[in-house]
Amino acid sequence: MTRDCWALVPVKTRDLCKSRLSGRLPAEARLSLVRSMLERGLAALRESKTVDRIAVVSPERDTVPSDILLLADPGGGLNAALEAGRLALLAQGARELLILPADLPLVTAEDIDLLVERGRRGGFALATDAAGTGTNALYVAPPAPFRLQFGPGSCFLHMQEAARLGLGAELLHTAGFDLDVDGPSELGELIARDESRYRGLPLRAAEGAQPGGVPIIGEPSSDELRSFAARHR
């Protein structure tokens, strides 16, 4: 019996994709990387046992397969796009919502199933980034009226929102969800892991050290977030 679990994947327009990597990759290579990561994420969703349907919210279809629902991006940034997608999927009858960014090159169907299964315990689950402060995937049921707040410190903000709604919160940390390729440091880590599909990327020489993953002053640590989750299960 279907639970009407929808996956929602946000994708930027081609001319805006991974602009932070412009110093290391030419435009054509950045687009190829984005398409490859999206393909990996969609394949993992298709292989998962817990996701019933998939939607992409984006200004254009590009390489999104024709059998996947494409939702219009109204503009205004990531959270505006996700909110438009959330409302559209509610109208489609969604009872569970999984948000999966398109820049997770190592994510697997097993990662996705684990997140959904954890979320079904209390209505909410979140996969953190490597630092433990960002949101690299999110599950919520029912998907209304949850306020999506992706961006700096989003893990804590989403945990607060789950607590506000009285949802039991689960935090998840896996190798597949850890790595989101947003800047040069994450790109270097991806290549260092020797993933065959990314090995041939035409890297430019670095023009200087570019710090990545620097925590925001006052942002809760990963240990504090896990303590918060334990208190709201």
Image (tube, rainbow, N blue to C red):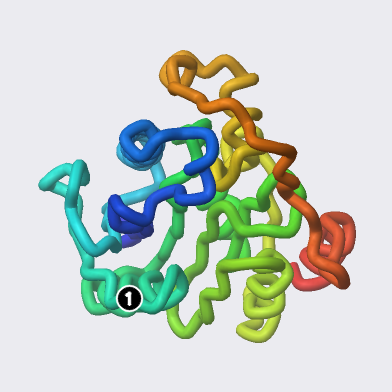
Q: Residue at x 50, y 25 (%)?
A: 203
In the depicted view, which residue is nearer to us: 39 or 184? 184
Q: Residue 114: in sight, yes or no?
A: no
Residue 181 vs residue 174: left or right?
A: left
Q: How far across and how far down the image is residue 29, in percent? A: 37, 32
Q: Residue at x 36, y 49 (%)?
A: 51
Q: How far across and how far down the image is residue 83, in percent? A: 39, 77
Vertical order, 108 against 118 (above or below):
above
Q: Quadrant of residue 152 in the image? A: bottom right
Q: Residue at x 68, y 64 (%)?
A: 155
Q: Quadrant of residue 205 in the image? A: top right
Residue 50 vs residue 24: left or right?
A: left
Vertical order, 167 against 35 (above or below):
below
Residue 16 vs residue 154: left or right?
A: left
Q: Would you name the residue on which mark 1 appears?
A: 75
Vertical order, 70 against 123 (above or below):
above
In the depicted view, which residue is nearer to us: 122 or 13? 13
Q: How far across and how far down the image is residue 3, in percent? A: 34, 60
